Each structure stands twice: as C-alpha cells, then as structure tokens.
Amino acid sequence: MIYLLLFAGLFMGWSLGTNDAANAFGTAVATRVVKYRTAVIIIAILVIVGAFIGGANNIDKVAELSTSNEVIASESQVLEAIKNNTVETLRLKSAIKAAIIFTCAALTVFVMSYLKFPVSANQSITGAIIGWGLFYADYKDPEILAVNLPQIGKFASTWILNPLGAGIISFILVFLFHKFVENKFSSLNHYDKIVKIGYLFAGAFASYSIGVNSSANVTALYYDAAFSKTGVAANLLTDARVAATIGGIAIAIGVLTYSKRVMMTVGGSIADISQMDGFLVIIAMALTVVIMGKWMGIPVSTSQAVVGAVVGAGLTRGIHTVNFGVFKNIAIAWVSSPTVAGLLAYIIAFATQNYFGE
C-alpha cells in the first residue's frame, strides 16, 4: 500500500510532461515544420532514454536539497530509527512527505499548463520544499532556519542566469546566421528538408536533455540517499537510476497526452520568428541546459531556457517582434509557481504538524 504514495510523483511527472514538451519541439510544431504527433513520439522516447542514462546524478542533487529541509530522512535520522526499531514508521512518513510535496508542486505546474504558461517544475518543487522546511524550522525552533540557504541560492540563481544565458546564446546564433549564412543556405536544393532534418536532430537532443534534467523532479523525494551508507531502506526507492527512469516514463506520458497547449504558446506567441530561427532556438536552449547543468552541478529549467532563447531570437529582428505582454505573464507565472507551491506545502505542514512534528 505504501507504494500508492508514488502516484503523487507520477502526477508530478505527468504535469511536467504537459509543460516541458514545448521546450523541445514547440517552435517546430508552431512553424509547421514537424507534425505534433511526430514531435511528441520523439520527445517521449528520448526523455526516457535521457532519464535512464543521465538522470541519476540529478536525483542525488535534489535529494541533497530535500534532506536538509526536513523532507527526506537524513543518515542520522535513519540510524536513530534503526536504533529505536522505528524504520518502517520513518519510511512511511518520508513517503507521505514526498507525496505531499509532489502534489503541491504538480498542482501548481498543472494549473500553469492549463493557462498555457511554460513554467519550471524545478521552481515549483523547490518552492514546496522551502515551504515545508520553513514551517518545521519555525515550529521546532524559531531561531533555527531548516533551509539549506546556499543550496537554495544555487537553485534560485539559475532562474535568472538560465533564461538570460539562453537569450544571449540564441541572439548570437540567430544574428550570425542572418548576417553570414542565410542567403547561401536558403538557396540550397531541398532547403525545407534540410531544415526539417535539423529540427528533428535538435529536438531529439533537447528531448534527451529534458530527460536528464527533469526526471529528478519526479521521483527524487522518494529516493533514499542514505541507503548506501545505512543499508536500510527509509524511503520507497533505493536506486537512483531506477528512480530517474520512472520519472522519465511519467514525463513521457504527460508529453503524449496533454502537451499541445503550452507548445503553441512557446512556439508562436512569445515572438515572431522564422522556421530557421526556431531551429536555432532549440540549439540555444539545449546548449544552455547542458552548460548550466555542468557549471552549476544541478538540474536547470528547460522551460526558462527555451523562453529566453525565443526572446533572444526575436530581438535580432527588432524589439517590436517580441510580445512583451505574453512574456510579462510568463515571468509572473515563474514567480508565482514556487510561491504558490510553497504556500500550499506550508499550509499542509501546519495541518499535519501533529503527525510529522515529533
């Protein structure tokens, strides 16, 4: 029965998939280079592959953030539970906490997807973890802040650096293409086919990046980071690769079932861009996610990267090509999603303090 709590994480994955599909093929679908059905099949397959191959490292990073914020049991808590013969109780409480956090974050992402706003699941989960940690810090000892501020600051800094970096890379790529390559390239035979093939390869790479970066946002809170040291399972999952792969599958289901709304916003509503610009946007997004992920050592948002890249591409044609009304609404959604998720988690922590506040 305890494994039924995993469904909250799967709901998170489904919500994430409905939002993040736009990051790989939104511009391709909106500019009618690639059909929607073809796009979602490619995304679903490559997300699972990316999660299986590279998602485990990010599982550890999110688990580290969660352990320091009263969500996942720490090694010392597990050892104490072993000593007191209360491991099963600790395991159940850890799974329930994870389910609550994921439900708060997933509801936030789902609402934003319904409103057609591309948002970061990373932000929503971080907000929910902070909300939970802040409540228990205040409840146990008002003088102690049970939030890993350096780690939170690291995650939060990517919310600015990520879209900014993607915008700069996209602007440079699109500007150089129009200045030095466009005339020669557009005169090639089978130009349309070349663009389509380029989109498919770029979208595939972006889909793989989503699997690597986003699978941790689905199951990391169910992962027992202390298992390798204690040898005792204090949560639902003890293998990081298995956890990441489950996350990838949940994301893929969301991609296949409800991803078109956000895809059209990203592809056609933020800025007026050409088919080739859209291809370069995907390249810029994927490069930014890989560079930021390697540099910061944590999972970063593909949603924020692709929005920044679309704006950067639009600015090469002039500021008038960017729909700043849509961009403003998306920016508000970026701020709102961690705030709402954090408030929900704080409220639920307050309601359940007698159960978790030992």
Image (cartoon, rainbow, N blue to C red):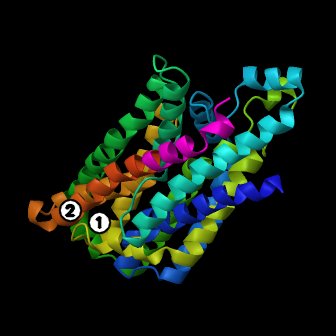
Q: Label 1: state its secondary structure.
A: helix
Magenta: main secondary structure: helix
Mark 2 surroundings: few (<14), some (14-19) or many (≥20) residues within 10 A: many
Residue on which the image places disc 1:
277
Instruction: Tell me the amino acid under the disc marked 2.
Output: Gly
Residue 172 image offset from top left, x and y in percent = 25, 50
**Residue ranking furthest to the right:** 85
Task: Tell me if residue 356 is in the magenta stretch.
Answer: yes
The residue lying furthest to the top in this view is: 143
Q: Is residue 304 above or below residue 15?
A: above
Q: Are marks 1 and 2 in contact (CB under 8 Å)?
A: yes
User: Which numbered marker is on residue 314?
Assistant: 2
Nearer-the-camera pick, 282 or 183: 282
Query: Which residue is more in the foreground, 225 or 353?
Result: 353
Q: Residue at x 61, y 43 (%)?
A: 352
Q: Is residue 38 something one can see in this rendering?
A: yes
122 to 44, vertically: above or below = above
Name the side, left or right, on which 146 lies relative to 75: left
Is residue 296 within the magenta segment?
A: no
Where's residue 326, x and y in %?
A: 23, 65
Counting every numbered tag in the picture gives 2
Which residue of the protein is positioned furthest toward the front in this rendering?
354
Residue range in magenta is 343-358
